[in-house]
Amino acid sequence: MRIAMISEHASPLPVPGGTAGAQQRHVADLSTALAELGHDVRVYVRRDNPGLPAMARLVDGVLVVHVPAGPARVLPPDLLLPHMGDFAQWLRSEWCNGDWLPEVAHAHYWTSGLAAVTAARQVGIPVVQSFHELAEHGVSVGTGASRNGYERALGRAVDRVVAQSQDELHDLVRIGVPRARLTVVPAGVDSIRFTPEGPAAERDPQRPRILSVGRLVERKGFGDVIQAMRFVPGAEVVVVGGPPAGELATDPNAKRLRALAEQYKVADRVRLVGAVPAGDMPRWYRSADLLVAASWNEQFELAPLEAMACGVPVIGTAVGGLTETVVDGLTGDLVPARDPRALGSALRRLVNDKVRRFAYATAALDRARQAYSWKRVASQLGSVYSTVAGRRTNEAEATV
């Protein structure tokens, strides 16, 4: 099939020495896997640098198209809505007048979805939507409307919405997306890049290492992890994520976490690394005895899946997609969210039980490779694309 990926703010192209967000990696890996199955994929992203070419090749079968919409500079995702009309108009013109017409469009994030639906409706192309994350209730987007309202309308306008977990599916139903329009397809993990074999980041072999990964925002639960370290004597926790290392000293979230570590007298065992290049992440996972994911509420997290693919067990909170990624008592342990004491007890038990860690790690690796391979994910999504494209074709023929 000819598949258009709409990912207006998250380009799949690698940034030399830079970090890649979860959506960027998702779009890159999914597009690559679809191309390996024989599909012809074009990824449409907003041009955010005047020096970018009109097109660039990601891999054989995947072209990245830079769409001129708005100023040619990086803008935060929450400031992109005013430029989606231009983005949609460019897509419509390209698809109507160019030599490549997609059979289906797959939009990533809500603003991409608005552009995709606007363009595709005029051309007769079905649209599949992945939100990746939903807004918290009542978040304004500066247009007099809430982002929730846009997401609800979008969920009803597209041909199919793909949720990454049952938890996300329930959230989508709650905001008004029809259940019959929803399909659950989990994200995948690159089991070639994320493996137990390979170099690991340096560490003290005498000190157990607990790793935690993500943006330094409160709902990720890093504060709970720091408090939990009181109950894990001798172990260290390494936090990867947030701003680059050189900006940690002035970052308010990093300062808050460091103050918390001082307050609970664990500062000598808490290390904030900051953002690291995407290519370095396997080294950090391999250096850890276990990964902790202590989010308060998360539809899906990629870090636990990447850790599992590196043969690292996971201690997670029993929320969102974590309850599906982590099999409690088999690939890791799940604890209540926002409970540092319960988290600390689980961490201490696993740190002190080498046999259980080995058993969890083996099962985690097997689960990541079997249930979350990109080939499997791409095959599932290919079936979704075929279904919506076939239905759209049948509807068009029925009106003739």
Image: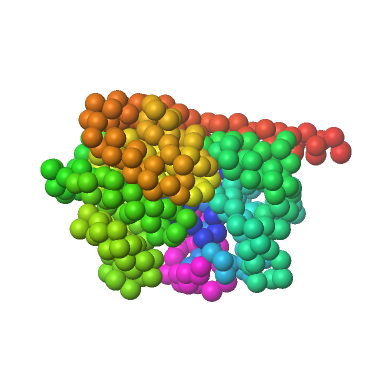
Q: Is residue 52 magenta?
A: yes
Q: Is residue 325 visible?
A: yes
Instruction: Specify the quadrant of the image occupied by residue 335.
Output: top left
Residue at x 60%, y 31% (from the top left corner): 383
The x, y position of residue 348, in whole percent, is: 28, 39
Magenta segment, prevailing SS (helix, strand or loop): loop
Q: Name the outermost residue toward the right.
A: 400
Camera-nearest residue between 323 and 261: 261
| Coloring applied to the structure | rainbow
Q: Between residues 129 and 245, which one lies in front from this camera angle? A: 245
Q: Magenta span covers which residues?
A: 49-76
- Identify which residue is drawn at 16% across, 49% down: 202
Q: Position of residue 53 (x, y in %)?
A: 45, 63
Is residue 7 rendered magenta in the image?
A: no
> Seen in the image, is 265 located left or right of residue 65?
left
Task: Specify the quadrant that holds the C terminus.
Answer: top right
Say above or below: 274 vs 143: above
Q: Residue at 68%, 63% (x, y): give it.
A: 146
Quarter holding the N terminus is: top right
Image position of 279 with respect to 52: above or below: above
Q: Residue at x 24, y 26 (%)?
A: 355
Q: Is residue 59 above or below residue 366?
A: below
Q: How many marks?
A: 0
266 with respect to 52 (left or right): left
Q: Say whether residue 5 is left or right of residue 88.
A: left
Residue 189 in view in this figure: no
- Across and down, in percent, residue 302 comes to 43, 44
The residue nearer to you, when weighing 51 against 263, is 263
